[in-house]
Amino acid sequence: MTYRIAMDFAILFLVTGLFLVLVFMRIRTGSIAEDYENTAEDLIYEIESGTASEERLEDVCAFLRVVSKENRETVYHVGEEPGKLALGKWYFIKGNGDLQVYVRQKLPLLLYGSECSAEFAFACTEEWKTMRREMIIFSLWYLGVVVVAVFVCYVLVRAVLRPIDEMSLQVSRLNLQNLHKERLNAEGSKAELKELAEGINGMLDRMEQAYEAQKQFVSEASHELRTPITVLQGYSSMLRRWGAEDKEVLAESIDAIESEAKSMQDLVEKLLFLSRHERRKLPFAKERFDMAEVVRELEKEMVYLTNTRNMQCSVCESVRVYGDKQALKQAIRVFLDNAVKYTDKGDTITLSCKNRNGACEITIEDTGLGMKREDLEGIFGRFFRADTVRGKNIEGHGLGLSIARLIIDGHAGKIMVRTQYTKGSCFTVTIPRQRGV
Ligand code: ADP
């Protein structure tokens, strides 16, 4: 990379040098030709005034031909016309290995009253050689400067690129095994590179967190699945040994297997929901609907499923909501299920739905177990179960509230919790009025 950049610079410098040489040559040849044009004009003046002697003309110019414009005849000439290798105003004649250079000037002149044209050829080999020498010296100097400049470029580019090279080496060494300990070294880098390195390190931190969370999720999901599988295995071996004969064991086993299968199905569905959400494949089918109706349906469901709790419901006439009806119903059901799970016989569960400043407010309150202050922070995390419920043989995987929160978040809603250990809990869900309502 460094080498390629240095080569690119070298080519750029050389092309610039070539251009400069051409410009320089153009200026020098132009000035030589101009000098001889002045000389030619002086000679024409002398010829016209009759003061030019043949010796003087032979001295100054290598060749002169005066041609009458009228009949194209040569009326006067001095010296021999140099060969024909002409390049514009310049003649180049190579003879005996030596280069002869002449510059040609053609000017009008009046000779004895008739219009003529005078063509001069001045020998300027020496000027040409001087110019060539200057050109060579300039080129050599320039080449020297190019070599130094390219070397300096190479050193600078290498110094600038070294940290990038190191970074790419470090990045190429990264893999899932060393993601937790390998980070780019931002120390000593220039400010912009430091920012880049810190940016990449930040990204690596986030990737590591996401990877760890994923690992944690898989391990906790496997752990959750392991319990029902163990129970199923236990009952199936019990059935194999005594179940066929013992009607009581048979009935108990079938009940247990049924309940564990249900629990597993519930867990797997929740896991699928979360993994779909993780991959952002959770499109909400939003529509306008009456939330009050949904809450009334949920109340009926609850009354049908549990008759040991005192259910109280206060639902206002109609609360229009714009959202995914089924998803929101699923979320409210989580709070209601919990209210049932974490209460005892005779406890009261109050469900209400009202319109508050255009937003829909649903409250699920219970007089059950409640939560400790320190548990409150974790309840929306995945697989979280408070210690106060763990030993109580209450079914659950600690996923319900995280799913409910995803759904409510997807509707720009809010969840508020009030709770007091042993006294009960109150979850308030607010779904704001959205465009389209
Ligand atoms: P699960 O109920 O399946 O354990 P959730 O995510 O629904 O999972 O709830 C997480 C935890 O929050 C519960 O394990 C429990 O400790 C606590 N919790 C939730 N709702 C209530 C409630 N109404 N009363 C007491 N504790 C609750």
Image (spheres, helix red, strand yellow):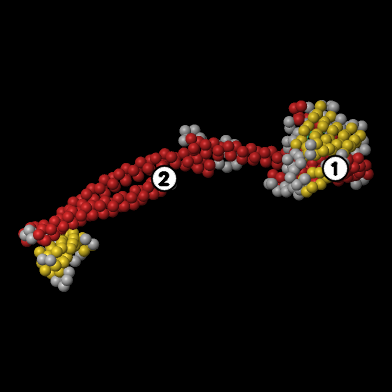
Which residue lies under the disc numbered 1?
Answer: 318
Rounded to the nearest angstrom, the CA distance separating label 2 from label 1 is: 72 Å
Q: Which residue is mark 2?
A: 2
Q: Position of residue 23 (x, y in %)?
A: 28, 52
Q: Position of residue 356 (x, y in %)?
A: 80, 36
Given the image, on which type of amino acid does mark 2 rest?
A: Thr
Judge whether residue 281 can be spotted in this image. yes
Q: Residue at x 17, y 71 (%)?
A: 70
Amino acid type shown at disc 1 = Ser
Dot 1: element:
loop
Please provide percent x and percent y for residue 108.
Answer: 18, 63
| Relative horizontal placement of residue 200, taking residue 158 as reference (left or right) | right
Front residue of 280 and 21: 21
For mark 2, does the 10 Å Cα neighbourhood hold few (<14), some (14 to 19), or many (20 or more) residues?
A: some
Q: 81 left or right of 179?
A: left
Which image quarter has ligand 1?
top right
